[in-house]
Image: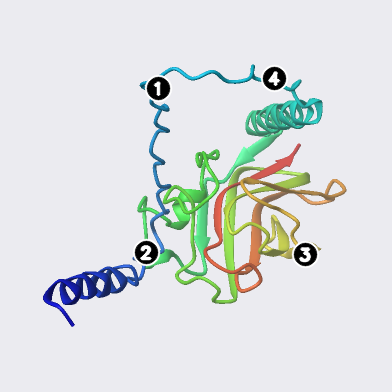
Amino acid sequence: MSRHTRILFSLAAALLIAGCKSKPSNPPDSAPTAAVQPAAQPAQPSSTPTTSAPAPAAAAADPSAATVEENKKLSAIDWALKQDEIKHDPNGQWATEVSASSTYNDATGDAAWSATQVTGPPNVEHYGDDGKAWAPKTPDGGIEWLDLKYAKPVNATEVRIRESCGSGAVIQVELFDEQGNPHKVWRGTDPTQELNYFVLKVPPTSYKTNRVKITLATNAVPGWNEIDAIQLVGK
């Protein structure tokens, strides 16, 4: 084998080894960053003009594509209006106190992912891992819960749970009367997807309540399951 051939062989082997490196994994408390795509480069003009057949007329815009885009916009508008309506519902109130079965990194107080993050109105803007929401100590651990208290006892008609990551893991909702007795108002499969509310409507309760407990099965939806805020509705 010539010296020139050996050099080329060594370079090729080095490139193959470099291409096999594993991608670094993201930590559980950080979201992946989208890669920035390079801008397309304009085509360079030919140094010598050439004669070519005239370009065909541009095809008419695809009406089905325009319809899909319009429907996406309308859906986004409807979503934003509904979020705003819930946030400012005069019959709704946001939790003032919260305790949890566990918290990520054993967070307490106002720390990221603590139970306190569920108090007050929603403040998570995008679906995904966010320290402004509550998260349990571990993902996929099984049963976890949040126990919430509100300023004013009401005859409840709705509970609205804003899920912000790993949506769909809620399995049970309980209300507590003023004597502290629990009333299971729902148990089942949570249909929530993406950043949205799980809205549970119930007949007006015969008792006053200012305490809500939700239970999650975090193993039912793989990954981190996070709750942004929970609203109690009633008069």
Q: Amino acid at mark 3?
A: Thr
**Horizontal placement of 171 versus 10: left or right?**
right
Instruction: Tell me the residue at 43%/56% (across/down).
Output: 113
Q: Quadrant of residue 51?
A: top right
Q: Which residue is mark 4?
A: 58
Measure the alpha-carbon separation of dots 1 and 2: 47 Å
Of the residues under marks 3 and 1, which one precedes in the sequence? Answer: 1
Compared with residue 231, is residue 5 higher up or lower down, i.e. above or below?
below
- The 10 Å Cα crowd at callout 2, few under 14, some 14 to 19, many 20 or more, is few
Lateral position of residue 104 relative to residue 180, left or right: left
Looking at the image, residue 16 sits to the left or right of residue 186; the answer is left
Q: Nearer the viewer, residue 226 or 22?
A: 22
Quarter of the rendering occupied by the C terminus: top right
Task: Read off the residue under disc 3.
Answer: 189
Asked if marks 4 and 3 touch (Cβ < 8 Å), the reply is: no
Q: Residues within 10 Å of mark 3 (few under 14, many from 20)?
A: few
Q: Quadrant of residue 220?
A: bottom right
Tell me the SS state at disc 3: loop
Residue type, label 4: Ala
**Image x and y of residue 143, in percent:** 61, 74
- Against 46, residue 108 (above or below) is below
Identify the disc placed on residue 45: 1
